Image: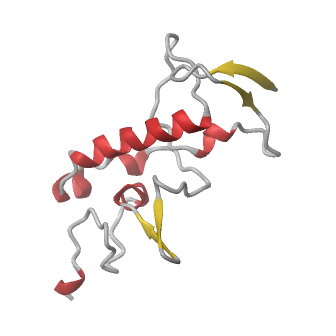
Amino acid sequence: MITNKTCSRCNTLFQCGATEANGHCWCNNYPPLFKPDPLINCMCKDCLHNATIEKVNNYLAEMTTEKALNNNIAKDLSKTNYFIEGIDFYLEKTFSVFTAWHHLKRGYCCNNGCRHCPYGFKKDTL
């Protein structure tokens, strides 16, 4: 069911609801970083995207190799079916570069020397 809502951040009107064939709202593509709050309603796509980037960046600012290996809560979040530009990856020329957040969600090091590896693996240590 589609519901008209007002963004709790910017007051823009937007549609929320099961608009996709699978019956899920577009916001289900984002990592579940926000707890339901009776004072804060849904956010529009732009505000949710920006709020998610802010929350991810705050989490990454506190990240250490030790935390990535032993206390990484990102790997325990519900999995999403989509990679989101600016959160899971960014584009550099014609390449997609995975972010530290993406690697943390995966939950382990692939030992490929990824540019943003939060697990401390460096390509020059091969």
Above or below residue 88? Residue 43 is above
Residue found at x 49% / y 16%: 37
At horizontal 46% and vertical 63% (from top left) the residue drawn is 90
Which residue ends up furthest to the top in the rendered image? 39
In which quarter of the view is residue 53 placed? top left
Could you tell me which residue is drawn at 48 percent across and 76 percent down? 93
Using residue 89 as the reference point, say whether residue 55 is left or right of it: left
The percent position of residue 61, horizontal first and vertical second, equals 23, 47
Q: Nearer the viewer, residue 16 or 122?
A: 16
Picture quarter with the C terminus: bottom left
Residue beneath the point at 29% across and 67% down: 117
Query: Where is residue 106 shown, x and y percent of the image?
Result: 43, 60
Residue toward you, 112 or 13: 13
Could you tell me how many numbered marks the image carries? Answer: 0
The N terminus: image quadrant: top right
Measured as percent of width and height from the top left, residue 6 is found at 64, 19
Q: Nearer the viewer, residue 56 or 79?
A: 56
User: Seen from this angle, which residue lies furthest bottom?
Assistant: 126
Coloration mode: secondary structure
